[in-house]
Amino acid sequence: MPLPNPVPLGVSGKKTVSRASFEAAGGSEALTTEEEREAYIVLNLIEALQRPLTGAGTEALLKPVFDHIPNMAEVLRAFAKKVLQTLRDGEPHSTVAVSGTTLPVAVAFGAWNGSHREVQPERTGGYLPGLLTTGLKLRDKGLSVAALLAIDVFAREAVDISAPGRPLDECFLLDAELSYVPGLLFGYPEDQPNDLPAVFLVNRSLCTPDQLQMLERVNR
């Protein structure tokens, strides 16, 4: 299929150049539809989830949760839409997916504009209350979940119209951070079957001293 004119650059497609300029710069790959953009983000998201910033080994939490979400491909597409929104307006966007299986699980997804370090000041203090509030809101809606997995991703796009031929993987970066809260903290019955890990994983560097003290009490 021939390239459109103008050609959208990067993943968001916010910036464009003429097809002649794109081809003259040696450009060979462009995402020209929303479907292509979402699919590209999904691939990057899957890769980022295999190397989460929360440390080696935490990716092992993904499979037990994802196994209980039958429409995971559709869910990942919904997450990709949030990343696109963030790339375009620079604001964080989030959504929550809840499985409809016999063992209900929730995956909370948040997209941030910038690197993990760049948005850390914005997240510090509000991270832990936001994580716990998500689970409590689900409970209050009558959605008792066996576990809450939170995925925060950090998206950066660097597009230069003076160098439109740069490959996509040089224009777009995506990292992921995982958090995990067992459903027992949200009132999930202890006597119900539950094959999910009974761990509590949070990013302590985003917590205030008072929140860290609270965590110490929870872990006793």
Image: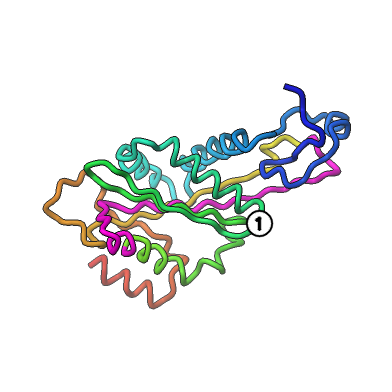
Type of amino acid under label 1 = Asp
Q: In the figure, 12 relative to 27: above or below?
A: below
Residue at 26% across, 65% down: 219
Which is nearer the eye, 98 or 60? 98
In this view, which residue lies farthest toward the front?
A: 141
- Quarter of the rendering occupied by the C terminus: bottom left
The residue stretch that appears in magenta: 136-165
- The answer to whether 62 appears left or right of 175 in the picture is left
**Colouring:** rainbow
x and y percentages locating residue 167 in the rendered image:
72, 34
Residue annotated with mark 1: 89
Tell me, yes or no, whether the highlighted magenta stretch contains residue 138. Answer: yes
Q: Residues within 10 Å of mark 1 (few under 14, many from 20)?
A: few
Residue at 58% across, 62% down: 119
- Quarter of the rendering occupied by the N terminus: top right
Query: Image quadrant of residue 132?
Result: bottom left
Evaluate whether residue 101 shows in this view: yes
Query: Image quadrant of residue 120?
Result: bottom right
x and y percentages locating residue 178 in the rendered image:
43, 52
Mark 1 secondary-structure assignment: helix
Tell me, yes or no, whether the highlighted magenta stretch contains residue 177. Answer: no
- The answer to whether 191 appears left or right of 161 in the picture is left
